[in-house]
Amino acid sequence: MFDVTLKYKDAFSRFQKFDHHYNFAPSKDEWKKTTIIHNYLKIFYDVTNVFYALKNPTSNIFIMEFCEIKIKIDRMCS
């Protein structure tokens, strides 16, 4: 859902310019927060897809994916 929302980010601001009664466009700060949340959730979404694609997920795969999550989150936090 965040992917679709972020694709239409410019449409919200354009619509607000043409319709002065439309007051619901997210602010720049809200778009920034949405992008940050999207980036965090995408990490978990991608890993979940890896596990669902496998018939027999093993501990080796789990540990590898878990480490990848940690590395990505550490990078985002620094």
Image (tube, rainbow, N blue to C red):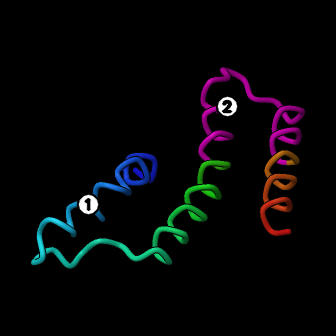
Marked residue nearer the N-terminal end (1 or 2): 1
Q: Is residue 16 above or below residue 2?
A: below
Q: Which residue is mark 2?
A: 50
Q: Is residue 52 above or below residue 69?
A: above
- Check disc 2: other Cα within 10 Å, few if <14, some if 14-19, many if 20+: some
Could you say which is closer to the camera, residue 24 or residue 39?
24
The outermost residue toward the top is 55
Q: Is residue 52 magenta?
A: yes
Q: Which residue is mark 1?
A: 14
Kindly identify the residue that appears in the image at 72 percent across and 23 percent down.
56
Count of marks placed on residues: 2
Q: Is residue 23 above or below residue 35?
A: below
Name the amino acid type tagged 1.
Arg
Determine whether the residue tagged by mark 1 lies in a helix, strand or loop: helix
Q: Are marks 1 and 2 in contact (CB under 8 Å)?
A: no
Determine whether the residue tagged by mark 2 lies in a helix, strand or loop: helix
Q: Is residue 53 above or below residue 22?
A: above
Q: Disc 1 or disc 2, which is closer to the eye?
A: 1
Q: Is residue 6 magenta?
A: no
Q: Tell whether 19 sits left or right of 16.
A: left
Q: Position of residue 42 (x, y in %)?
A: 60, 49
Name the amino acid type tagged 2.
Val
> For the residues marked 1 and 2, what is the alpha-carbon distance in whole angstroms?
38 Å
User: Range of the magenta residues?
Assistant: 45-66
The outermost residue toward the front is 17
Q: Quadrant of residue 37?
A: bottom right
Q: Position of residue 69 (x, y in %)?
A: 79, 50
